[in-house]
Amino acid sequence: MGTASNEAPLVARLDDARRAVYREHILDVAEAEFGRCGFSAAKVGDIATRAGISLATLYKTFASKADLWDALNTDRMEEFTRVVTERTSAIASPLERLLVGARAEVEFFAARDAFLQLHLRDGLSWGTASTFPGAGQGAQRVAWRTGMAMTAATAQEAIDAGELRQVRSEVAAAIVISSLQIWLTDWIATGRSRPIDQVADDVEEHLRRSLAV
């Protein structure tokens, strides 16, 4: 009896681990497919084929294409938030947190090339999309709002500290996020030929000139 009862939790943990591996693999493949052709044109069957699994196996993990899209955007936004927080939490100056955060965001999107492209493919302004209820798709809208709120909160701290020009924090955040989009779009358009740290340098210098007191 003791052996059987001990084996049951072990089997459950192995099943959970297997599902987690499948889930992450499917999300990676879906990210590439969404980046290649966008949400509307992407087909769940193609994602399953590229992942090397059956459609039935995919649907055991994700109920629909929208569910897959939402999970991808939610997971990446959590990863994005964690990366930015780790890079900025020890910095005392709000302005420097804002600039270092922008650099971290450039590097994050460059490392997640397909995720970058799926957001660029929509042709929407990152700096203003979160203010329009119909912009974006599902959890993508939540990701935009989260990113905007984080940036605006830091911008307000910098304004209160006298480090940032006297503009509304939402405007400052829109300038930061729009700058990321502009430089990353150019990086893609020019074949990713420039080292990403140089791109991040350009963004940081531009923001410092534009926003700092």
Image (tube, rainbow, N blue to C red):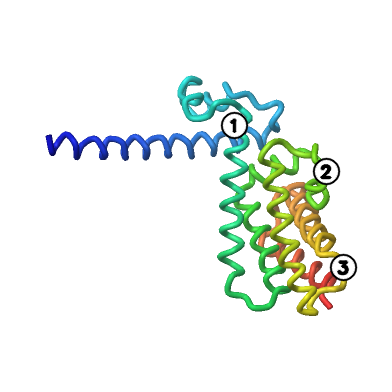
- Residue 202, compared with residue 174, is above or below; it is below
**C-alpha gap between disc 2 and disc 1:** 22 Å
Circles 2 and 1, Cβ within 8 Å, touching? The answer is: no
- Residue 177, compared with residue 159, is above or below; it is above
* Position of residue 23 measured from the top left corner of the image (x, y, whole percent): 47, 36
Judging by the rendered image, the residue that carries numbered circle 3 is: 167
**Which image quadrant for residue 94?**
bottom right
SS for dot 1: helix
Q: Residue at 64% of width from left, 46% of height from top? A: 113
Q: Please count the marks in the image.
A: 3
- Residue type at the position of mark 3: Val
SS for dot 3: loop
Residue 171 appears left or right of 158:
right
- Residue 209, compared with residue 54, is above or below; it is below
Q: Nearer the viewer, residue 196 or 176?
A: 176
Q: Which mark is residue 5?
A: none
Q: On the rendered image, what quadrant is the N terminus found in? A: top left
**Which image quadrant for residue 177?**
bottom right
**C-alpha gap between disc 1 and disc 3:** 38 Å
Q: Residue at 67% of width from left, 68% of height from top? A: 100
Q: Nearer the viewer, residue 52 or 87?
A: 87
Q: On the rendered image, what quadrant is the C terminus found in? A: bottom right
* Position of residue 71 measured from the top left corner of the image (x, y, whole percent): 57, 38
- Residue type at the position of mark 1: Asp
Judging by the rendered image, the residue that carries numbered circle 1 is: 67
Judging by the rendered image, the residue that carries numbered circle 2 is: 132
Mark 3: few, some, or many residues within 10 Å (few <14, many ≥20)? few
Q: Residue at 62% of width from left, 75% of height from top? A: 91
SS for dot 2: loop
Residue 107 appears left or right of 8:
right
**Which image quadrant for residue 207?**
bottom right
* Position of residue 165 measured from the top left corner of the image (x, y, whole percent): 85, 73
